[in-house]
Amino acid sequence: MMKIPLSLHADRLFPADKTTRDIARRLYQEIRHLPIISPHGHTDPRWFADNLAFENPVSLLLQPDHYVLRMLYSLGLSMEQLGLGQAADRELDPEVIWQTFGDHYHGFRGTPSRLWLDHVFADVFGIDVVLNSDTAADYYQHMQGKLQSAAFLPRNLFERFNIEVLATTESPLDDLRHHQRIVNSGWTGKVITAFRPDPVLDPEYEGFHGNLVTLAALTGEDTQSFSGYLAALRQRRDYFKRHGATSTDHGHPSARTADLSDRDKAALFDNILSGGFSPADAELFRAQMLTEMAGMSLEDGLVMQIHPGVYRNHNPQLLQRFGRDKGADIPLPTEYVRALKPLLDKYGNDPALTLILFTLDETSYSRELAPLAGHYPALKLGPPWWFHDSPEGMRRYREQTTETAGFYNTVGFNDDTRAFLSIPARHDVARRADSAFLARLVAEHRLLENEAVELAHDLAYGLAKKAYKL
């Protein structure tokens, strides 16, 4: 296999016809160098607290990225071949794992992962040939050398990427020590946390009952009573807010909400604690707790995000052997109109609440989500998420939501990634995709170009900063 030149075409993702492409170019030039607002993601705050060199390309680029893992697993590679689940005395050499990755890199053709990775290889590492079997060894040596240099320390990369603010996501049981160390260090980079209470809100989450015991120990509240449980959650939300959090995040299986009486809420909580609850009881409890979280957001001002509609860890053998987030999460059909009604009846008309909705069910965009966000002051639409964080997903999102919800009931872009080096690549894809969409509206005389310039700036920067109170 020959060495194939790798270059990032200046017009990638822009329209093919010259008139619209020229408009897209002009719009993109207005926003390409804007700072990055990354208001939701899953990078490790320890990286920025320790500011130590990343160990190797495999542990940085391959093993934490479930997009990469799921594709390689689907192509017949085992998790052991990717360096996961190995016994300490027979761990694979990372360079061998990278060679395996290079041997199978062709499997990513046409995927957003290919766009992001090529951007990382070319723009971040300065590599000018495509990754394949013949170039994998050179890739590894080149990147390993770069990763040991001062320029590739986490804080220096953060500044090089022009990140204005980066939000990580932590459990309410986290002590946030790494965030505190970042603040105490005097470094000016802004890394904040977000409150993800699933481990103590979802009765079916592994270790739920033990988590409530830990929550009690952290707060001094009686988490075996519903009132004490709510008081403990309020206390942890306040703790997160004092450590920089501006948002909460909820990864429930559905978007269902409920508004039970005080008596029924307490009885349901007692049933959950008894351990004899049914799946329907667990779903009702999660539904009630989303409404409780919305009420608390009105109290403390934290923005509320709901990421529903995923069958997490669909492959039980993989979960048992290798743990969560190994690429086996599968989208589900998700209903919003009836599911959200109890919460919206109670809080949806209050503009002081910001509730950001995400979906993996694209059929809900034009039918449910855009009409809801186009009416309720509390609702905003999150950007294309996970499987749809892609050029085609972004185009479909704009086409299906803009006519009903407009642009200003959306919240810009967030990358929602564990792969730190992909953040500038993902934001660049979003900026190019939005420039292309706006250019079409200008070319069709549906939007003035000066309006498109203002919109492009808002979609790339302003809306996320405003929606997440940054």
Image: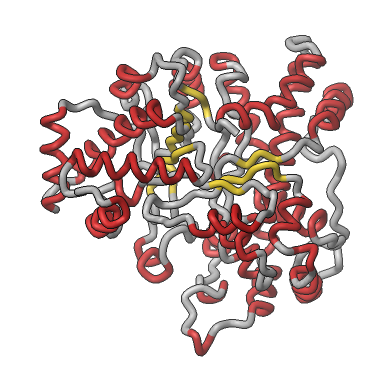
Q: Which of 18 and 345 is in front in this view?
A: 345
Q: Where is residue 165 in the image (x, y as percent from the top left)?
A: 65, 43
Q: Residue at x 75, y 51 (%)?
A: 159
Above or below for 348 versus 280: above
Percent position (x, y) of residue 243?
A: 50, 46
Is 326 situated left or right of 414 in this image? left
Residue located at (79% from left, 57% from top): 124
Give residue 229's position: percent from left, percent from top.
Answer: 23, 44
Q: In which quarter of the image is the N terminus?
A: bottom right
Q: In this view, does 390 lie above or below 117?
A: above
**What colouring style does the render use?**
secondary structure
Give the quarter of the image for residue 45: bottom right
Q: In this view, does 110 lie above or below 136?
A: above
Q: Residue at x 52, y 27 (%)?
A: 381
Q: In this view, does 26 lie to the left or right of 95?
A: right
Image quadrant where residue 320 sits: bottom left
Q: Could one spot residue 280 in this view of the protein?
A: no
Residue 2 pos. (x, y %): 85, 68
Which one is in front, 395 or 57?
57
* Quadrant where the image shows the C terminus: top right
Report the residue at 45% width, 20% height from top: 352
Count of numbered marks: 0
Residue 466 visible to an observer of this rendering: yes
